[in-house]
Image: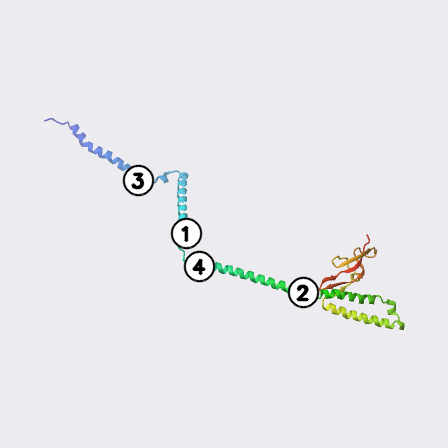
Amino acid sequence: MTMVPRAFVRALRQQPTKLATAHAAPLRSFSALSRQQPLSSRLPAPARARIMSRWYSDAAKEAEGEKKESAEQAKETADPLKVELEAKNKEITNLKDQYLRSVADFRNLQDRTKREMQAAKDFAIQKFAKDLVESVDNFDLALQNVPAEKLESNDEQFKELKQLHGGLKMTETILMNTLKKHGLERFDPSEAGEKFDPNVHEATFQTPQPDKEDGTCFYTTQKGFKLNGRILRAAKVGVVKNS
C-alpha cells in the first residue's frame, strides 16, 4: 500500500475553505455596495442640483398637463343646469345694459324736447316783434322831434303840443312795459357809453372825439332791440376813432 504524504492530505483539507472564501468575497462586496448611499447623493452638488431640477421640472409639467386634462373633462361633463344658469345670467346682464341705455336716451330726449319747447315759446313772437319795432321807432322819432324849448315854455300856444307830447310819451311807456313782459327790450348804447361790439352794434360812421376813448359808441342813429336776451335788431351807432 502506497503511503500518501501528510502534506498533500493537509492541502486537500484546506482547499474547500479557500474556495468557499473566494465565492463569499463577491457576495460580501455586493452587500456592501447595497448598503452604500445612492449614486445621485455621491455626485457633486451642482450636478445633483441639475438632475433634481430636471426631475422636478418634468414632474411639474406632467402635473400641469393632468390639471388641464381634468379641467377639460370637467367642462365636458359639466352640469347642464349650471351651463344654462350662466347663459341666463349673461342674458340678464345684456338686458340690463340695454335698459339703462334706453333710459339714458329717453332722458336726453326729454331734456332736448324741453329746451326746444322753451325756445319755441321764447321766440314765438319773433316775427311779430320785428314788425312791431318799426312802430316803436316812429313813437321815438315823434317824441324826439318836439323841441325841448317848446316843452319848457309857458306859452299858451304850446299847451296843446305839450299835451300831445305827454300822451305820446305815456303811450310809448305803456307799450314798452308790455313788450318787456314778453321779453322784448330796447337798448341805447350811447347812453351807457358801451364799447363797440359787432355782435350787438352796427357802426354807421366813425369820427374823432378827443374826450372819449377809441371804440366807444358815442351816438345812436337807431336803437337796438333784444328778445329774451337774443339780439333781434342791432343798434346803429357812431364810433369814436381818434387814431
Q: Position of residue 62 (x, y in %)?
A: 39, 46
Query: Seen in the image, is 182 located left or right of residue 88?
Result: right
Residue at screen point 46% across, 58% down: 87
CB contact under 8 Å: marks 2 and 1: no
Question: Where 241 sits versus 121, above or below?
Answer: above
Up the image or down, 43 lies above or below 68; here it is: above
**Which callout, 3 or 2, points at the residue further toward the start of the chain?**
3
Q: Nearer the viewer, mark 4 or mark 2?
A: 2
**Tell me, what colour scheme is on the image?**
rainbow
Tell me the element at label 2. helix
Left or right of 144? Residue 53 is left
Q: Residue at x 43, y 57 (%)?
A: 83
Task: Report which quarter residue 22 is drawn in.
Answer: top left
Residue 84 is tagged as 4
Number of marks present in the image shown? 4
Task: Find residue 161 and report its horizontal and vertical position in percent.
Answer: 86, 71
- Graded by Cα atoms within 10 Å as few (under 14), some (14 to 19) or many (20 or more), the crowding at tag 1 reads few
| Upstream in sequence: badge 4 or badge 1 | 1
Query: Quick one: label 2 or label 1, which is nearer the N terminus?
Result: 1
Q: Which residue is mark 2?
A: 120
Can you tell which of label 4 and label 3 is closer to the viewer?
4
Q: Can residue 173 be seen here?
A: yes
Q: Label for residue 34?
A: 3
Q: Secondary structure at mark 4?
A: helix
The amino acid beneath tag 3 is: Ser
Whether residue 154 appears in this view of the structure is no
Q: Are marks 4 and 2 in contact (CB under 8 Å)?
A: no
